[in-house]
Image (cartoon, rainbow, N blue to C red):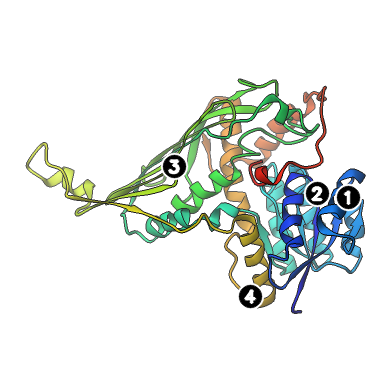
Amino acid sequence: MDIVRFGIIGFGNMGSGHGRYFAADEVPHAKLTAVCDIKPDRLEAAKEICGDSIKLFENYEELMDSGLVDAVIIATPHYLHPPIAIKAFEKGLHVLSEKPAGVYTRQVREMNEAAKKSGLVFGIMYNQRTTPAYQKAREMVQGGELGELKRFNWIITDWFRTQAYYNSGGWRATWSGEGGGVLINQCPHNLDLWQWICGMPTRVHAFCQFGKYHNIEVEDDVTCYAEYANGATAVFITTTGEAPGTNRMEIDCDKGKIVIEDGKFKLWKLDKNSSDYLKNDPNGFAYPEREYQELTFEDGGEAHKGITKNFTNAILNGTPLLAPGYEGINGLNISNAMHLSSWTNDWVEIPVAEDLYYEKLMEHVATSQKKEAVVETVFDTEGTYGSR
């Protein structure tokens, strides 16, 4: 095989974005050959964007059985990601799933098991992992350059959305259709980067507010406190109801600190471990010597296109995946734990008790209300692709 033939399943906002870079021939050794969507107007959009050469399907199993594809990109509503992926593995197809990996960890674990059994390439669209600033932060923290983690804080409140956004699809912002709000829709990238850079916390206590700013049944405002096995702590704050909002990641370690905000990577390095210094220096007001730098990066990474390039190279050449699909369960463990903590008003250990979480989720699904005054959209403009 010298070209990977792709099929896109789901041609809404995200699927159409993937279709555009295939149409522009921006992924070497890859070709879009088929698109599937249950809505005829979206298939018409696929033809307009990608040309008449692609084959259109209304049923994803027919696409999988067509013999036209070697791999699929899954860009459907969240609950469908694992069952479609499992079916693709059974049919011998490689899988690249949009985020989140799923809605609850039990179904994602089953997907991971199916992927492992198949031996096929399995990736997830964690496009923020292509960002050089986050790659550098991971390198420094995981490599031990700044010593042991002490504190992680991320204020990510610039996910502002209007009510019109939530009215743009019948599945949006419902427990039955989406399985959550800002945590499951906007923040999977942030939760993934948190654990990718700093590792998994051991427990969380979260406070989710449901429909605080919008007429929705799921969370649109979250404050979470988390703890690590070594005693380090984390605070994660997010919302879709604040403007202009903030995006500030701060990582404090024993020998320095990183702040990523407003396109800047600020770095402080200490000459000694602060833990040792505070115990041993005789001067009560002494302070470790520190060096300050601002690191610059040429670009923000190749985002979705970069993940697809890497995935294609993994199929053709065995290149290691930047975003293995198996890792999708990690950030989902954190968001499931946040929901469960808020529902029970208690600490929740990680990994989350998946049967208990599923039980509580289904209670919310059972009372989920059909949305009124929905204005369906075929896909958003190119400028919003990736913004969810």
Residue 39 in sight in this render: no
Q: Nearer the viewer, mark 4 or mark 2?
A: 2
SS category of the residue bearing label 2: loop
Quarter of the image where the N terminus is located? bottom right
Q: Which residue is mark 4?
A: 318
x and y, in percent, of residue 202 in the image: 47, 43
Say whether marks 2 and 1 touch (CB < 8 Å): yes
Label 1: few (<14), some (14–19) or many (≥20) C-alpha neighbours in 10 Å:
many
Mark-to-mark CA distance, 4 and 1: 33 Å
How many neighbours does mark 4 have within 10 angstroms: few (below 14), some (14-19), or many (20 or more)? few
Chain-order first, disc 4 or disc 3: 3
The residue that label 2 is drawn on is 11
Give the secondary structure at mark 1: helix
Closer to the chain start, of discs 4 and 2, is: 2
Instruction: Give the CA distance from mark 2 to mark 1.
Output: 7 Å
Q: Cβ–Cβ below 8 Å for labels 4 and 2?
A: no
Q: Residue at x 73, y 43 (%)?
A: 78
Quadrant where the C terminus sits is top right
Task: Give the label, 4 or 3, closer to the camera.
Answer: 3
User: Residue 43 bears which disc, if any?
Assistant: 1
Instruction: Give residue 309's position: percent from left, percent from top.
Output: 65, 66
Residue type highlighted by circle 2: Phe
Name which residue type carries label 3.
Asp
Percent of width and height locating residue 69: 83, 67
Q: Earlier in the sequence, mark 2 or mark 3?
A: 2
Q: Disc 3 on helix, strand or loop?
A: loop
Q: Are marks 4 and 3 in contact (CB under 8 Å)?
A: no
- The residue under label 3 is 262
The residue lying toward the viewer, choosing from 313 and 274, is 313
Badge 4 element: loop
